[in-house]
Image (spheres, rainbow, N blue to C red):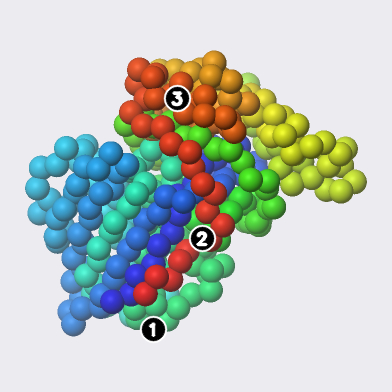
Amino acid sequence: MTVSSAPGKVYLFGEHAVVYGEPAIPCAIERRATISVEARDDDHVRVQASDLSLDGFTVEYTGTTDDRPDVDVPASLVDAAMGYIDAAVEQARDAADAPDAGFDITVESEIPLGAGLGSSAAVTVAGIDAATRELGAPLSVEDLADRAYRAEAAVQKGEASRADTFCSAVGGAVRVEGDDCRSIDAPDLPIVVGFDGGAGDTGELVASVRALKDRYDFAADTITTIGNIVRRGERFLDPDPSDPAADQSVEERIEEIGRLMDFNHGLLESLGVSSRSLDSMVWAAREAGAHGAKLTGAGGGGCIVALDPTPETLTGLRFTPGCEEAFRAELADDGVRRVA
Ligand code: MEV
């Protein structure tokens, strides 16, 4: 049996705009999906998935999604997870030149589905890594990130950036702009995550932003402005020594990053991808004294990310109606981990 894990992520800046070639900065966090893969003698694929959420509901089934018992989670979410697993299997078969390879796959995840923390990218990265190694055809981290991107793009009908999958494969904070993906040296950020217990459909949300952008020039301008926020944000995350931002203390730079996150959230809200519960968690974080707060990922429901070194935001979020869970997220320096 071969086992790989890969981390989830939060977006400090730039989701949605990154789909149109603007830069984005996601950051890997220590919430992982772990995939165990065992090759079979036939060409069947059996999937067992459990704990695909922070709040511990369980989805267990074997075979196709038709065999899935009733579970307390929208069927569309489980179908979405299966879509990513199927796409990962296809990429692994292709990479190993083994079109008839069959697998027994077990998915364990600490990352809620569709909640903006990169569950699909983590499952895809860990799945391709474990399956290719099981077939004796291990990939470099770059090739793994590329294969995982292709799998995500297939599921999201071509509307995906490389950001989530690259971040999950390499870990740490990364900057992605089109095909240009690289790690950046961000300071240790005091990240707090609030989770409303819900989820959004990435494909639908990306399509709704595309429709607004095609209809209104000012929506297209909003996407360009998000790109400008990311460009300013990266100067404060990882300043060039010749940049005046490099003269500021880390605390001052984190304050500016927080202000830019607030701005980024306002623009995502205007593009229609926030929700009442995401907005109320963002406001609760700001009122508790966070340096800044924004939704993370595709939106529609799920998680917000805030910056606060004190315990206040965590406490404030825990008392916010609509917030099911709040936690401090540790940065994940490692991307994919070859566990066994
Ligand atoms: C989803 O986690 C991030 C989006 O920007 C889509 C993508 O980049 O593929 C909304």
Which residue is identified by label 3? 315
Which of the two discs, 2 and 3, sits closer to the camera? 3
Image coordinates of residue 322 in percent, x first then y, are: 34, 21
Q: In this picture, is 106 found above or below 140? A: above
Whichever of labels 1 and 3 marks the residue nearer the N terminus, that label is 1
Question: Can you see residue 70?
Answer: yes
Task: Tell me the CA gap for discs 2 and 3.
Answer: 30 Å
Which residue is identified by label 2? 335
Q: Which mark, by number, is residue 136? A: 1
Which image quadrant: the C terminus?
Answer: bottom left
Q: Which mark, by number, is residue 176? A: none
Task: Tell me the CA gap for discs 1 and 3.
Answer: 48 Å
Q: Taking 69 as reference, is 258 left or right?
A: right
Could you tell me which secondary element the residue under label 3 belongs to?
A: helix
Residue 226 image-quadrant placement: top right
Are the residues flagged by discs 2 and 1 in contact, CB closer than 8 Å?
A: no
Could you tell me which secondary element the residue under label 1 belongs to?
A: loop
Query: Residue at position x 70%, y 29% from top?
Result: 255
Q: In this picture, is 55 found above or below 46? A: above
Could you tell me which secondary element the residue under label 2 belongs to?
A: loop
Q: In this picture, is 316 found above or below 31? A: above
Question: Can you see residue 162?
Answer: no
